[in-house]
Amino acid sequence: MRYAQGGGLTAERRAFRERLRFQAAGRFGAEQDNAVIARELRVSVRSVQRWRKAWSQAGERALLSTGPASLPLLSDELFTVLETELNKGPSAHGWPDQTWTLQRIKTLIGRRFHKSYTIQGVAALLKRHGWSCQVPARRAVERDEAAVAGWVKEIWPQVEQPRRRSGHGSSSKTRPGSR
């Protein structure tokens, strides 16, 4: 099963799924049909089939949760250290500006903790700990509104392609004699 945010199940969700499996096990003993169990527990028939097979081979202990699929590379203690490093800012770590990017954080994790994350893994790690993408709340002080207005008025119309109108001469209509 894949999860959109890439994190897997929380401890509460794993416990909930385990309770579902045990409810299904009680129904296996009553010889209920897989489709009926699936509908009543609001799970897939395939899941009930897997649970029934595991239950018939090893009993209820086969339905116990085995815990998270994998442990995070950075423990909560190490993530606290990472937060301290992030709060120092990118320039403290050798970058020329004050912008944290996922690539820079990935590099920092590699340098500081000797752990290898993917860009998506860094994004998931930060999201899991409550961090989010930041967008500037204000325009840059250096922004020249007059220059922007001039560009939009003078340069952009030259760059923008003229729009085609449907009608006579449009290539969207078939010409007489063409197939």
Image (spheres, helix red, strand yellow):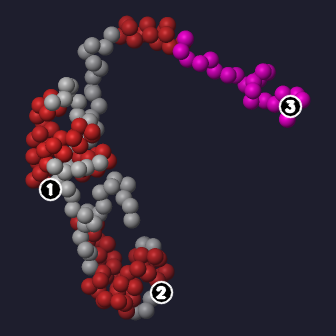
Residue at 27 percent across and 39 percent down: it is: 103
Depth order, front residue of 146/178: 178
Is residue 174 found inside the magenta-colored segment of the image? yes
Percent position (x, y) of residue 95? 19, 29
Mark earlier in primary sequence (2, 1):
2
Q: Which residue position holds label 2?
A: 33
Q: Establish if 94 lies above or below 76.
A: above
Percent position (x, y) of residue 67? 24, 70
Counting labels gives 3
Label 2 crowd (10 A; few <14 / some 14-19 / many >=20): few
Q: Which element type, helix, strand or loop, lies under badge 2?
A: loop
Percent position (x, y) of residue 54? 36, 84
Q: Which residue position holds label 1?
A: 75
Residue at 31 percent across and 89 percent down: it is: 58
Dividing the image into 4 quarters, which one contains the C terminus? top right
Find the residue positioned furthest to the right: 177
* Amino acid tagged 2: Asp
Q: Which residue position holds label 3?
A: 178
27 left or right of 96 in image: right
Label 1 crowd (10 A; few <14 / some 14-19 / many >=20): few
Residue span colored magenta: 158-179
Q: Quadrant of residue 177?
A: top right
